[in-house]
Image (cartoon, rainbow, N blue to C red):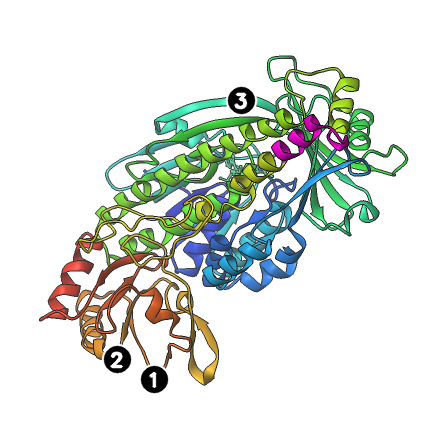
Amino acid sequence: VTSAFETDVLVIGSGPAGSGAALSLATLGVDHMVITKYRWTANTPRSHITNQRTVEIFRDLGIEDDVLAQGTEHERMGETVFCTSLAGDEIGRVRTWETAPDRASDYAAASPSPNCDIPQTLLEPILVGHAASRGSRIRFDTEYVGLEQDADGVTVSVRDRTTGHEYTIRAKYVLGADGGRSQVAEDIGLPFEGEMDVAGSMNIVFHSDLSHLVAHRPSVLYWVLQPGADVGGIGLGLVRMVRPWNEWLTVWGYDINEPPPVVDDAEAIKIVHQLVGDDTIPVTIRSTSLWGNNKRYATRYRSGRVFCLGDACHRHPPSNGLGSNTSIQDAYNLAWKLAYVLRGTAGEGLLDSFDAERAPIGKQIVLRANKSIEEFGPIFDALGLLGESDPEVMTRHIAARADNTPEAAEQRAKLRTALELKNYEFNAHGVELNHRYASNAVVPDGTPEPGFTRDPELHYHPTTWPGARLPHVWLGGPGGRRVSTHDLAGKGRFALLTGISGSAWADAAAEVAEKLGVDLVPYVIGPGRDHIDLYDDWARAREVGEDGCVLVRPDTHVAWRSPGPVDDPTTELTRVLTEILAH
Ligand code: FDA
């Protein structure tokens, strides 16, 4: 086959999954190319909550500061309001994204990186820009048409949308990051479970200075309970901050079994005014779009040399803010494995671990996001709105909670419980961080999986159990500066963490790195060494003896650990790494 272009990896799509893959591959020095359908990146804000795990990945990729500089900070994300309109009756608040005083310490302890709120319109250009500056070849206006695989590679047909010209690109591996209507996933026949288009939603992006209604209760989400708010959509009407406090996005539902509504500017302004609760406020509509809520996930992400990632594999509503986070995490999981295989440091078998590790998380987030929509039901129930469609009756029932009657007291108690349930959507720290991989790229240490002492969806449970994300603690680094355990790991390298009495592990690691040609950096943590356990936090977190070790993969997940010394650490580490790298 002769193709106009040859590359090691062809990435299709430049959304969070595609641009995340491009940046990861470029940082690892992998030859690759990106094709993407439109002339530029996302044209509407879309996903925005960027959780600690993702910002940690950005930290490893060297773009954390850029993302935090452009995003809205953690401190301004948390006063999530439930109301009849922004100007109307406030029904209650939930402190969200781990900003509540009782959650703040969990959050600060879990990661070196804060979460933030950054719309896709700002995030994607950061990812794409850094990827291009590090070597990505990115071709906009270029559409995927089809592919053919053989034993050595994939020939991909593409169309230049500016000229209509079709040509082929030859790649060793292809990443289908082409979103929720993925043609690549369809062409390689990925098996799916669940349904598409279970409910209808409408996004309206607008500019309007709403400071006077929101700045005193800063949040990224203002939920509006109005007649019709339970039809389609994402559970309630939503006014979402894009940029404080003059750029916004409303989400309103519609009945997907009826013909799609026509949303012209006049209709859009009417909906915005209705949710804001003031029809005198000047509003400029930027865009409107209709989209379907999905509940569908792939059970396999790969066919031969073609991998899918992001929304191509998991399709779900925005609840819990997991869309772009999971997509970027998929990319980060796959990139180092491709780099190792292409360099010849690992056998092809390493790639089998990609969907073994990511498909269970894709399924989990699809189900979680959909359940979060159902969990608005108790709020309707508490306010006596279930099955009620008469606006006047609804307004009366909402107002009745202020009465001095036993019924109203019961209503208030029910409302409190109903709002608490929303922690599973807005404070699901465990869903965000408790990823524990089981695959051929993790070597068990023979211990059973540690149980959860607190609700595993709400709370993160740090552990060095093989497969889990490396626990973060602050260490003293060179010059007394604080560095995270996560700063020792990552950067495309394996890391081995041990203590002074485990120095034999460090010597063995250096020897094995040389012998296998693997980038493996040993760290001895202790007084007089480059890294000091300043607060003894590592001693508490490591779950192995000072003379044991924790081996960490390039994606900061634990590969394997040893509780103490062994007779021949070189042979032991060789065994473990050979298994992980599928030699
Ligand atoms: P994504 O869809 O972002 O990117 C796909 C890429 O593939 C695009 O660059 C596209 O141009 C390209 N492409 C598609 N077909 C192609 C072809 N044939 N050839 C070449 N390129 C092709 N999530 C969330 O968490 N919170 C939210 O508020 C929202 N809101 C929201 C609103 C709207 C309108 C949408 C459409 C989606 C959301 N989402 C969301 C979902 C979130 O945007 C989504 O989870 C991520 O963008 C997924 O990232 P991907 O990169 O996988 O797909």
Which amino acid does the dot numbered 2 rest on? Ile
Quarter of the rendering occupied by the N terminus: top left
- Residue 527 has which mark? 1
- Residue 395 has which mark? none
Q: Check disc 1 and report its element: helix, strand or loop.
A: loop
Q: Give the range drawn in magenta.
A: 401-415
Residue extending furthest toward the right = 280
Q: Check disc 2 and report its element: helix, strand or loop.
A: helix
Which residue is under mark 3?
197
- Above or below, 263 relative to 327: above
State whether residue 234 appears in this view. Answer: no
Instruction: Of the two numbered discs 3 and 2 on the same chain, state the one appearing first in sequence.
Output: 3
Residue 320: give x, y in percent of width and height: 54, 40
Front-most of 171 and 359? Answer: 359
Residue 45: give x, y in percent of width and height: 65, 42
Q: Do the residues labelled 2 and 1 touch (CB within 8 Å)?
A: yes
Which residue is under mark 2?
500
Which amino acid does the dot numbered 3 rest on? Asp
- Above or below, 164 relative to 244: above
The reply, left or right, for residue 211 in relation to residue 503 is right
